[in-house]
Image: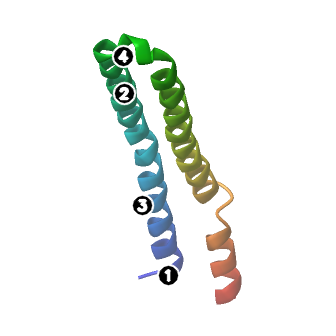
């Protein structure tokens, strides 16, 4: 097996996992919003703290999705691992 092809295959599998992280972030954000709406429905007087906690949690979840997208873009396009591997083989 060609070692460069193997490294590229591992890079594509890793990028797929990173993109899958972005898709799962959507479900996490839906669960956060659902829990916040449920909490506000149970205790309407606690709307302010629940909303604040919800927005902080949504920001952290969105950041995880963005990091996954950035990692996937770095792996797919500039791919520093592949460039270093080719220089090592040469």
Distance in Å between CA atoms under marks 3 and 2: 26 Å
Q: Quadrant of the N terminus?
A: bottom left
Please tell me whether mark 1 or mark 2 is closer to you in this view: 2
**Is label 2 in a helix, a strand or a loop?**
helix
Does label 4 or label 2 sit earlier along the sequence?
Answer: 2
Distance in Å between CA atoms under marks 1 and 3: 15 Å
Q: Which mark is drawn over residue 30?
A: 2
Please tell me whether mark 1 or mark 3 is closer to you in this view: 3
**Is label 3 in a helix, a strand or a loop?**
helix
How would you rate the neighbour count of disc 2 (Cα within 10 Å): few for under 14, some for 14-19, many for 20 or more? few
Q: Which mark is drawn over residue 3?
A: 1
Does label 3 or label 4 sit earlier along the sequence?
Answer: 3
As drawn, is 75 to the left or to the right of 35? right
Q: Are marks 3 and 2 in contact (CB under 8 Å)?
A: no
In this rendering, is residue 15 above or below 32? below
Q: Quadrant of the C terminus?
A: bottom right
The residue pinned by badge 4 equals 40
Q: Which mark is drawn over residue 13?
A: 3
In percent of the image, x 40 and y 46: which residue is there?
Answer: 20
Please tell me whether mark 3 or mark 4 is closer to you in this view: 4
In percent of the image, x 42 and y 60: which residue is there?
Answer: 13
As drawn, is 19 to the left or to the right of 59? left
Does label 4 or label 1 sit earlier along the sequence?
Answer: 1
Does label 3 or label 2 sit earlier along the sequence?
Answer: 3
């Amino acid at each position: 097996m060609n070692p460069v092809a193997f490294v590229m295959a591992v890079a594509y599998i890793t990028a797929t996992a990173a993109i899958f992280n972005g898709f799962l972030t959507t479900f996490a954000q839906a669960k956060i919003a659902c829990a916040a709406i449920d909490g506000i429905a149970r205790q309407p007087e606690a709307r302010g703290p629940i909303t604040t906690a919800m927005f902080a949690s949504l920001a952290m979840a969105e950041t995880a999705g963005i990091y996954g997208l950035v990692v996937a873009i770095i792996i797919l396009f500039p791919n520093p691992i592949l460039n270093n591997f080719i220089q090592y083989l040469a």
